[in-house]
Image (tube, helix red, strand yellow):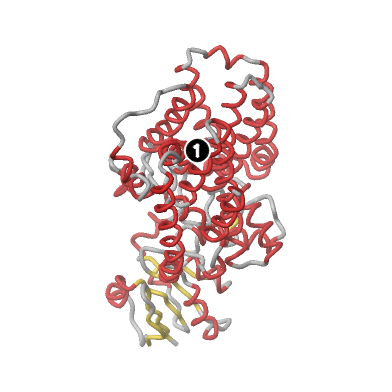
Amino acid sequence: MENKILIFLCLILFFFCNWLIPVTDPTENCYALTAKEMLQAGDYFSPRIYGDFWYDKPIFFYWELLLACGIFGVNEFALRFFPAVFATLGVFLTFFFASRMFNKKVGFAAAVILATSPEYWYIAHAIITDMTLFCTISTTLMTFYFAYTEKKPRYLYIAFAAAGVAVLTKGPIGFFLPGLIIFLFLISQKDLKYLWRGEILKGAALMLAIISTWYLPMYIMHGQQFFMDLIGVHNFLRATVSEHPENDVWYYYALVFLIGFLPWLLPMVKIRKLPQLDVRRRFLIIWAVTVFVVFQSFATKYPTYTLPYMMPLAILFGGYFSEREKLFKRIAAAMVIFLTIGTFFGIHICEKHSHKATAEIISPLVDKNTCVVSYGQRYAGSLVFYSGLKVYRLEEAQYMEKMKPAEMKWSTVNVMPFMDFNHLPDGKVIVVVEIESVGKFFKLVKGDWQTVAELPEYKIFIKS
């Protein structure tokens, strides 16, 4: 019965209306366009975007996108298919882990709490790597726990294999984060000698073998640039230099935590007596706190980064709500209704941050002599995805040098084609301008520009 309820929840919460949610800027378009260009090139090994190789993320999530697009076609449902699949897998992993760790009642409550938490629901729809990383890191830690507490060392091979897939999904954090959690747990157990088991060494070799299937050939084919971009910029630089300095505040993930688990957190304030801190709860607490502290210490902060702490927290919350059945059912039912309605609001929000409508408007106006440009803080990457057109990022000449990709700087991500105002052609030009940048745009250009369309976040102009 529990399995059927969870399947129904996942279908409603994670898959429903995915075909109506357009690809958004500035993040989803990068994954979607990369998968589209890899398919067009017939290259399933080297990520590429705007006609060039790029090394923003490892390959595993792109393989998911390529597989889904091969089955369903290049469309929104295909692109959101595997995030929803892995979200469903994460719910069942939580149910299985908590049931085995405590009992089935706690497991079911934990799985429902996870599935109906706003942060998890949001990431289950997003075309990003984080849900895959959540499942692989969770599998690593679950299987380690079974190996350690049940004295079944063969599970360590599964743990290391999952860590290898995590590294293929997001980079070295896929190994170092669960590795740090395990290390701290063993310190709490005063059992660091466990790290010298033969299965640990063999498992590490297995993980390296899995990682080497992609990292080694990529380094051979693309050389130092691959290593510097993927490991240097998107791992080391991300941890030490904030990509978005305005988010680098001490309370950032505290807010994410409060919003991400609403309303499940609210009844918890009534707790008067904490449960016994046995090995099970100690492991879960070390898991959750380590994730929080590690990513809070990173300079670059995104609301999706702390997703791996949601499983242990959901299980800890599940222990509380499993003893309060009426309250649990009321909140769960309310959240299912709220999030289902929220899907329709989400579609509207995504439409505002997508250029799907822009592509439909300008595609009939474009001929072989038309230049298409995008102006504003946010480049219209999803316009490239939906239209297949070459779209230049328009910048002032004085900023062009600063915007060009450079080693170990965040400008490395600026791989789109650029054009400055001085080089706008005299012929037919279509420009997509963010609403707040329209005034500045007309101070910098000359000519007879006509309004083509006005969208919620953008205006489209044309000059013949």
From what the image shows, is residue 138 above or below residue 430? Answer: above
Question: Of 67 and 370, which appears nearest the observer?
Answer: 67
Q: Can you say which quadrant of the picture contains the C terminus?
A: bottom left
Q: Quadrant of residue 421?
A: bottom left
At a point 41% along the width and 68% down the height, the residue shown is 345
Q: Quadrant of residue 443?
A: bottom left
Q: Would residue 326 be found to the left or right of residue 360 on screen?
A: left
From what the image shows, is residue 197 above or below residue 297? Answer: above
At a point 45% along the width and 40% down the height, the residue shown is 322
Q: Quadrant of residue 219?
A: top right
Task: Please tell me how crowded label 1 is: few (under 14), some (14-19), or many (20+) other residues with Cα within 10 Å.
Answer: many
Q: Would residue 110 be found to the left or right of residue 155 on screen?
A: left
Question: Of 223 and 121, which appears nearest the observer?
Answer: 121
- Label 1 amino acid? Val
Q: In the rendering, at what x and y percent does residue 86 appear? A: 59, 49
Q: In the rendering, at what x and y percent does residue 301 appear? A: 38, 45
From what the image shows, is residue 418 above or below residue 172? Answer: below
Residue lying farthest to the front in this orientation? 326
Total numbered badges shown on the rendered structure: 1
Q: In the rendering, at what x and y percent does residue 232 appear? A: 49, 39
Q: Which secondary structure lies at badge 1?
A: helix
From what the image shows, is residue 221 above or below residue 282? Answer: below
At a point 31% along the width and 46% down the height, the residue shown is 266
Residue linked to disc 1: 106
Q: In the rendering, at what x and y percent does residue 139 appear? A: 59, 36
